[in-house]
Amino acid sequence: MLLGRPLSLADLEDVARRGRPVAICAEARERAAASRRAIDAIAAAGDAAPAVYGINTGFGALAETRIADHDIRALQRNLVRSHACGVGPDLGDAEVRAMIVLRAQVIALGHSGVRTEVLDLLAELLNRGVCPRIPAQGSVGASGDLAPLAHLALALIGEGEARFEGQLMPSAVALGKAGLAPIELAAKEGLALINGTQYMTALGALALRDAAALCTVADIAGAVSLEALMGSKRPFDERLMRVRPHPGQAGTAGNLRALLGGSEIMQSHADCPRVQDAYSLRCMPQVHGATRDAIAWAAEVLTREVNSVTDNPTVFLGTGGEGGEGGAELISGGNFHGQPVALALDLAAMAAAELANISERRVEQLVNPALSTGLTPFLAPRSGLHSGFMIAQVASASLVSENKVLCHPASVDSIPSSAGREDHVSMGSISARKLAQVIENVRSSLAIELITAAQGVDQRRPLRPSAGVAAAHAAIRRVVPELAEDRPLYRDIAAAAELIRGGALIGAVEEVVGALN
């Protein structure tokens, strides 16, 4: 994959999770080198140069403090060291790799004034498998994700820790084992490496990729539940979707129609006296679809962010003007502020949580004998002696409740920092972390629904479900056997969650019904 050209969230995921190699495109090298010459022109003027933020001044509330020419390199090194204040658990390798991709992408866009040597080192961290140790907490999401990005920058100068071949070690050792050498930061480079939204965008982008897949998984799980509960597919009629043309709603309804075609179970109750199904069944297009639309909008926001320049100050070549030097202009602004990302990720968390919210209601329909006509209480083989899926529903309810707490938007909060200079911040890093946890909870909730609904389908034998539901049922049964007597279900839930995570469930269904939305 070529950095410096437009990236999609799928591109980012490929590098972060699947190790796709990267390279710097030729145009990006030229842009980076040209912007660096503008910085070198200022640095070469030494103490005679005007004060330019980030090059020969202090940072934040110390922006008016002039730094002598002989201290400029020490300034950048000290900036990285002092800002490495992360706390909490370490990020996983995929999240760290996504951050590296995004940091390199910003520089490759040619407005950062960073040398191509730094750009090459970032690319080689990815290609050779060096993952800086980055604690997950410590960013307020404005002036950039300063603390997490400082831990990334530490590795480039051979400080801090990094993982290589599965082992945590000093960064200098990891670089050496990978055949790389640390770099000494020149003027502006420390600031360019830590200013920006790459932490929140990395975590958020990967979570949104997962969320988009979970929308399809929710449709599959809902279809299995519908068959187990002997529900109707009539509410998914295309004509209903046309008169309320939300794209997500249409997408989910289309999936459900594809999944439910040719069902013996459904044909068996075609003339039953039930008029309407519960909302958790009947309104899947409206609920799942609204989530789809919200996730799609958030993905658009993050795709723009992935391809944006978010450090400060920003180098513009050939513009001259106030603050210009050598045909370039450096403009200090606020592109590092994470509010666009924070708002999008907060909405995504609320939207994704609804997939678990409605899923848990379907599980209640399956296990509650007052609602599940023809199924055993709690889907137990011998109710009373066996408890069946009683506590599986409780576990799902606990995840749903936890999600409600996590869905409080971080972006409505702000705590001033840096002696009041940074007086409004986005808290977007917290939005990203919350979204990632919501996604994990949703995945587990859908896993619970899948194994519960599969048991319900088993109890409808000898009637056969639709081909799509049969394919989902078979995929589940490959990793979770039918419940013949009570057993610990945590392994089953974990196995179903992994079936979702790896894409095997969607793949198995699509082999039978074709591509799903």
Image (spheres, rainbow, N blue to C red):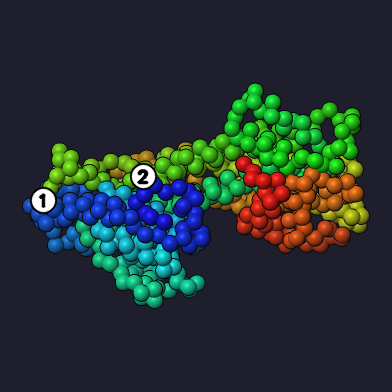
Disc 2 from disc 1: Cα separation: 29 Å
Residue 105 or residue 99, whichever sits in front: 105
Residue 483 or residue 126, whichever sits in front: 126
Say which element carries label 2: loop
The x and y percentages for residue 176 are 36, 75
Q: Earlier in the sequence, mark 2 or mark 1?
A: 1
Question: Image point 80% across, 41% down: which residue?
Answer: 262
The answer to whether residue 101 is left or right of residue 80 is right
Residue topped by disc 2: 308
The x and y percentages for residue 42 are 14, 52
Question: Image point 77% across, 40% down: which residue?
Answer: 261
The x and y percentages for residue 278 are 78, 34
Residue topped by disc 1: 49
Q: Quadrant of the C terminus?
A: top right
Eyeballing the image, is 418 above or below 24?
above
Q: Quadrant of residue 228?
A: top right
What amino acid type should be assigned to the residue bearing mark 1?
A: Ala
The x and y percentages for residue 180 are 34, 72
Circle 1 residues within 10 Å: few <14, some 14–19, many ≥20: some
Eyeballing the image, is 208 above or below 94?
above
Circle 2 residues within 10 Å: few <14, some 14–19, many ≥20: some
